[in-house]
């Protein structure tokens, strides 16, 4: 929204070759440079350049419009840090040396610091469009087209959802203003002619067996289809998009016989209907470093017989699904389903799932945030099992399947870091647990992260801007949530916030933003040459006495 407003402002002033800047309080320093096309290197005129303060209360303090040579200049600046950004019609707005995750390099003004002769590069956007048709070549209107992108997130390469839209009546879709990168497309839709017969019951109200239910040749569904023509995300074709590309990608959906799942909910004395389970399907779980989930569409009906709720979901394309159901205190659990044929699932049967219960506490002795959620994330990807905590920090998770899980805690005030954890009935590996056949008791001590660590990244005595500054915890494979990172500013300065007391190694890596730093082997050589730090909760703002060498 902000970028769009600024862009319209620049267009409205398009009759000007340059615009007088609005400057902050008078000072002795200057920030200047040229806005260029990142693909051709050509200077860009009529680009709007803004200068803002940094920090949580960021405020724009000056702006200007580039002339024919793409030049910009801000004079009379006080010593300090400034965020520099440019916007131009036909290009994607960006900050100076911007990287994924919102990291960029602030320009620092002061005696002996370089803040002139900068090059701020903008990329032209790419466009992807096409049409979706069915088996007969007819347009598939109202189809949902999901755009995925492979990108760095949390120190690893993941495939994540970046956009989605619905096709027009003529089956067309369009994604514009795309950055260069690797993308995937997935399409889900319902055949317009599909007919899913309603489920029938015996005279006493009990459902008839699935093999006695009515069938129809029109009981069909489209599998979720990935470009070019795959029904499994692992076989999807990666789409390489370069800056300024216009890619036309058409796809055809093929209907298959639909399947049906009948879900028997646990019996309850309550007259309230329990939360309805959701069918989800994971995509890019193996290739994408954790996977993305979407809710499968289907025709759902609900009945109650002798205190037992029966949920029927029809019109589902065959495939591998996760059935997520919800219990008390917001707890959820997941059941893997291979829906190659019609199936009945009894959620009242315990199977080999176990209960995980325990208590969470803040290390400071303070109360937990009003809304605190414990999550168990499966190590091989898939849906998380989660539960809200009670006021005293206690929690109960029911129906947790055996397997490896990473323990995470989120709250209304942001993620909480685990300082230490104890478990009974499960194997403990740092912040991971291995659940077997026994009930699990889990206790954890939490922190918001109370320390701010500041310093300089330098090489040969000179500050290096744009470097990846990474604080790596001891035993990183078990303490992924304790990593902290920042991008160094033009003078090499950096600040790492919300650091949890403990033992770390600090590294600064030039051109390190493509590293999968969450994998210990990827950064082992850098860590071997890093700076060892033992951080306590005092002082709360730690200024490092010596710079960290940029590798």
Image (cartoon, rainbow, N blue to C red):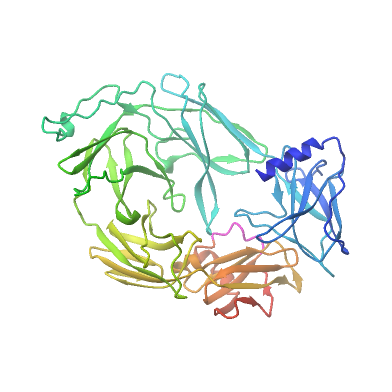
Q: Above or below — where is 458 with respect to 25?
A: below
In the rendered image, residue 344, in percent from the top left (x then y), is placed at: 21, 40
Would you place residue 417 above or below residue 157 in this image?
below
Q: With 65 as the anchor, is 99 left or right in this view?
A: left
In this view, the residue in front, 81 or 232, is 81
Above or below, 218 relative to 246: above
> What's the residue at 20%, 54% (across, down)?
350
Count of numbered labels shown in the rendering: 0
Residues rendered magenta in the picture: 510-516
**Quadrant placement of the N terminus:** top right
Quarter occupied by residue 509: bottom right
Specify whether residue 401 is in view: no
Out of 528 and 19, give the one closest to the viewer.
19
User: Residue 31's spot in the image, x, y percent?
Assistant: 83, 58
Extreme residue in the left direction: 204
Residue 527 horizontal side relative to residue 263, left or right: right
Does residue 186 appear to the left or right of 388 in the view shown?
right
Main SS, magenta residues: loop
Residue 221: name its quadrant: top left
């Amino acid at each position: 929204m902000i970028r769009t407003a600024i862009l319209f402002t620049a267009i409205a002033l398009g009759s000007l070759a340059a615009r007088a800047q609005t400057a902050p309080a008078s000072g002795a320093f200057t920030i200047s440079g040229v806005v260029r096309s990142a693909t051709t290197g050509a200077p860009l005129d009529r680009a709007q350049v803004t200068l803002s303060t940094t920090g949580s209360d960021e405020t724009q303090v000056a702006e200007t419009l580039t002339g024919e040579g793409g030049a910009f200049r801000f004079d009379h600046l006080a010593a300090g840090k400034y965020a520099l950004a440019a916007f131009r019609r036909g290009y994607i707005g960006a900050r100076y040396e911007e990287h994924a995750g919102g990291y960029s390099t602030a320009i620092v003004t002061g005696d002996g610091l370089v803040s002139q002769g900068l090059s701020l590069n903008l990329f032209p956007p790419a466009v992807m469009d096409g049409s979706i048709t069915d088996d007969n070549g007819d347009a598939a209107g109202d189809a949902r087209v999901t755009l995925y992108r492979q990108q760095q997130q949390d120190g690893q390469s993941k495939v994540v959802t970046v956009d989605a839209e619905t096709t027009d009546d003529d089956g067309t879709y369009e994604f514009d203003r795309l950055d260069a990168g690797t993308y995937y497309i997935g399409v889900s839709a319902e055949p317009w002619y599909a007919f899913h017969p309603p489920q029938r019951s015996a005279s006493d109200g009990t459902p008839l067996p699935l093999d006695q239910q009515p069938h129809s040749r029109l009981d069909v569904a489209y599998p979720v289809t990935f470009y070019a023509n795959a029904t499994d995300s692992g076989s999807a074709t990666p789409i390489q998009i370069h800056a300024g590309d216009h890619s036309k990608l058409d796809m055809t959906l093929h209907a298959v016989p639909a399947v049906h799942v009948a879900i028997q909910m646990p019996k309850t004395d309550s007259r309230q209907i329990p939360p309805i389970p959701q069918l989800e399907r994971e995509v890019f779980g193996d290739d994408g470093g954790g996977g993305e989930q979407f809710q499968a569409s289907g025709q759902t009906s609900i009945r109650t017989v002798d205190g037992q709720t029966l949920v029927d979901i029809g019109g589902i394309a065959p495939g591998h699904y996760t059935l997520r159901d919800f219990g008390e205190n917001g707890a959820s659990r997941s059941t893997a389903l291979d829906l190659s044929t019609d199936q009945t699932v009894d959620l009242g049967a315990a199977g080999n799932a176990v209960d995980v219960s325990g208590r969470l506490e803040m290390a400071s002795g303070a109360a937990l945030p009003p809304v605190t959620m414990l999550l168990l994330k499966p190590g091989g990807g898939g849906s998380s099992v989660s539960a809200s905590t009670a006021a005293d920090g206690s929690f109960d998770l029911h129906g947790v399947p055996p397997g490896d899980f990473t323990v995470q805690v989120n709250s209304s005030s942001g993620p909480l870091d685990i300082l230490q954890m104890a478990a009974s009935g499960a194997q403990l590996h740092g912040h991971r647990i291995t659940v077997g056949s026994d009930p699990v008791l889990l206790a954890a001590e939490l922190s918001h992260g109370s320390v701010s660590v500041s310093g300089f990244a330098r090489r040969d005595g000179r500050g290096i801007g744009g470097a990846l500054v990474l604080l790596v915890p001891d035993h990183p494979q078990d303490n992924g949530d304790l990593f902290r990172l920042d991008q160094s500013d033009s003078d090499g300065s950096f600040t790492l916030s919300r650091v949890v007391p403990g033992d770390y190694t600090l590294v600064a890596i030039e051109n390190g933003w493509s590293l999968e730093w969450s994998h210990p082997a990827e950064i082992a050589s850098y860590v071997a040459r890093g700076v060892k730090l033992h951080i306590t909760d005092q002082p709360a703002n730690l200024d490092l006495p010596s710079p960290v060498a940029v590798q």
